[in-house]
Amino acid sequence: MKFDLIVMGGGLAGAALAVALRKTRLRVALIDSEWPRRPEDWDARIYAYSPANAKFLDDLGIWRHLDQRRMSPVHEMRIFGDAGGSLTFSAYQSGVGELAWIGESSLVHLELWESLKRQHNVTLFCPARPLGLECDEDAVRLRLEDGQRLEAALIVGADGRDSWVRQQAGIDASVLPYEESGVVANFECERPHRQAAFQWFLPEGILAWLPLPGNLISIVWSAKSAVADELMMLDDAAFAARVAAAGGHALGRLSPRTPRAAFPLRLMRVAEVVRPRVALVGDAAHAIHPLSGHGINLGFQDAKALANRLEGLHSWEDPGNQSVLRGYARSRAEEPFLLQYATHGLNRLFGTQLPFVSGLRNLGLNLTARLPVVSNALVRYAINGKF
């Protein structure tokens, strides 16, 4: 079967790319190992969607169909250092409606797939797994485990941090394990969060509380592996008490709403995000520390940039041509690079327990809080992806 491009991976970034190409002449094959599913209760995988990406999803016809009862805006972000430093970002003071939207991964994922199922130029191969990939000057040829053979001008690796496409294409990836894990869970709060998000830089790691509808919050605790293992071994009551105490009981008593989960954290940089007839998006192209909350937003902006490059092609132009792909790579060179180094630097800065370093980093938080120009610039970056 012949297509113009194959998208390997139907997660948020890959699915968004395919939907973004809905008005083009391009024939798209999307391959994934399983259909997205909604959990029985709340999804433990929660993302912070920036306003820029909310607009992107709205342009795709997705955002307006999401159940707003399962999403919460962020009107304020309160950040606390480990020695008295603090910083608050306010949507109101910055003249914007919200700093971000907090919602379940599955909520957006399922809506993207509902759009894909109706899309005239997309063929879904699911469940399906790749077996072999060949690239030459004219095309890429993909073999699936069930014996099907697909041919296209371009293959897009949207298949996560351990990307099969990236490995098959021979693109080197430099991986730096943080020797940390992210522990995630959802809780009910005793007191209302009032659409405020919280983040604490603690000796035991970085703890974030993200508001969900009602009195629900989602937490991400990025901690050294030994601390994360300890957190995972606690019973529910002890775990809730530990999370509440780490956050200074800012929202009173916490009650578990979903089972907790943990995942290893690492920094990943790739040597290049494109090769002839190959492009990478999302976690296949970059992995950053979750303290910034920008992981999925980078993936969406990858999808948007690549879709913009492809939909502007003339009918005679080749989607897999290196000049086309280099244009995509240039457009996505700066933002992931800056965020990777910024989050890596912050993680290392707050992971150092030397007294003089502690004083400097907390002083930095306090000085930023007293400089509206700087704090408003940071808010604009969080919202628009640019200063």
Image: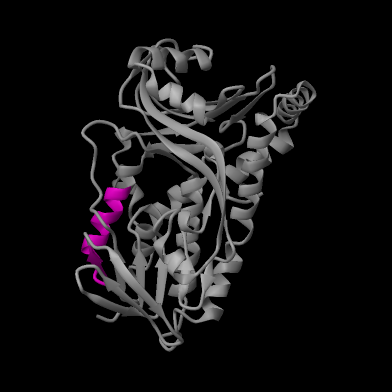
Query: How many numbered marks have been drawn onto this rendered protein structure?
Result: 0
In the rendered view, does 144 fall on the left or right side of 383?
Answer: left
* Percent position of residue 214, x then y: 34, 23
Q: In the rendered view, how is the structure colored? A: one colour
Image location of residue 346, percent across then percent down: 66, 37
Q: Residue furthest front?
A: 226
In the image, residue 131 sits, relative to residue 252, either above or below, namely below
Report whether residue 196 is seen.
Answer: no
Residue 379, image x, y percentages: 61, 39
Q: Is residue 29 magenta?
A: no
Q: Quadrant of residue 118?
A: bottom left
Question: Could you say where residue 261 lies in the image, as x and y percent from the top left?
Answer: 37, 32
- Asked whether 98 or 19 is in front, the reply is 19
Task: Please tell me which residue lies in front, 9 or 58.
Answer: 9
Give the vertical position of 385 relative to 26 (above or below): above
> What residue appears at the point 59 percent right and 64 percent down from the top-left corner?
271
The magenta stretch spans residue 123? yes
Q: Residue furthest right?
A: 356
Q: Which residues are magenta?
A: 109-125
Write the residue at 48% across / 34% down.
181
- Residue 140: image quadrant is bottom left
Q: Going 66% across and 44% down the picture, which residue do you hit?
A: 342
Say whether residue 77 is visible. yes
Quadrant of the image occupied by residue 233: top left
In this view, the residue in front, 225 or 341, is 225
- Specify whether 51 is left or right of 12: right
Quarter of the image that includes the N terminus: bottom left
